[in-house]
Image (spheres, helix red, strand yellow):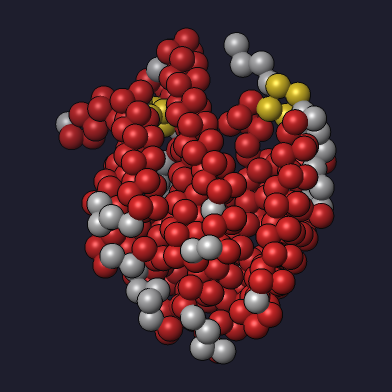
Amino acid sequence: MLHKIGNSMLGKTKQELSPSIYHRMFRFQIRVSQLMLWMSLILALIGPMLSMFSYNIHGEIMMAAISMFYIGIMYSQHPGFTNFMPDKMASIAMAMVSITWSITLMVGTWLWRPLAASWALLYIAIFMQNGLGSKPLYFPNWFTLVGLLGVLGASFTGFQWGLIGFPIASVISLLRRVNGKMRMGKLDLLVLPLYPVIASLLWLNYARVIFLFLIIFSLGLPSSLPRSDLSSALPVGLAVAMTIGIPAAGATILMKWPSILYFHALALGFLAPIMLSLCVPMLLPGTLWIWPKNYSEEIPALIGASAILRLLSYYYGNYALIASLMALYASLIIASTHYLRGKRIKVL
């Protein structure tokens, strides 16, 4: 009975909807996802420039940008990943709460904590309706779920950098799908229960070390990768993430650098290359309804260079910082060019 009430309030499975109703709900759900993604893009363009003036504000804006990006990406894929279409009111609530949350995080008010818990709980409730299980289609969703539990932990402790656990869990979920690792392994039985706990304790050095190992254990070696013009950058993005992002984050712990550099290394060295080699070329076309013209391997390579230069700026100051920003914006401009030269997809 409670499950049926939840279904009627939060959405319905595809089998419960007629094709015409499903189509209308699909268009609405994608439009909501687009709204969250455009908000992310605006923040991602503003945030890097502020790093030269206020590192804390820059960090808060970029955390909001990355989180909004993965809320939008994962929400746009939700029906395909769970066989469940969220209700219109649930989609509106998801967008309104998450966008309001991103604003409160940027301005530094404590309201980000209850609002983060609100959108995480809403998304958890939607996930609980359908799409959790051991089936190959459903299993990667567990990583998204533990990422959402990590958001709850960060909102409880008030440690805002712990919010990075959700984007990273989303990346793990997506990569498990594209590289063919869609069944539970022995290490997953260790990673899944530990992940939200460790993500909630990332102000501690030992938790940061464990977190890096959880990421490595979750991803492992890919058994397969898609091959197309739009996936050509993915091997480079994965190589950059695993050889620059993870080691750079580990180096910040060994060198006892300021903790913010650990999270910056994960965001710029690990998340950004995968965002721009997996999510942007392979997932955004179906969400933004634009088919980009080819895609470039140099995009994640530039992101990797940007991550290294940003770490070097700790020693070499503004020269390395400016070079890092130039490499970052160059990658964004090249990625945007592929979309500007692309073709609009007509969705009837």
In the rendered image of this protein, does residue 268 appear above or below residue 125? Answer: below
Residue 276, image x, y percentages:
68, 50
| Residue in the picture at 82% in, 47% down | 296
From the viewer's perspective, is 277 left or right of 348? Answer: right
In the rendered image of this protein, does residue 186 appear above or below residue 288? Answer: below
Residue 254, image x, y percentages:
55, 89
Instruction: Pick whichever, 307 or 221, lies toward us.
Output: 307
Residue 39 in sight from this viewpoint: yes
Residue lying furthest bottom in this view? 255
Residue 41, image x, y percentages:
56, 42
Instruction: Pick whichever, 335 or 237, lies toward us.
Output: 335
Instruction: Pick whichever, 58 or 340, lies toward us.
Output: 58
From the viewer's perspective, is 208 left or right of 4? Answer: right
From the viewer's perspective, is 300 left or right of 9? Answer: right
In the rendered image of this protein, does residue 106 appear above or below residue 53? Answer: above
| Residue in the picture at 59% in, 56% down | 48
| Residue 149 quadrant | bottom left
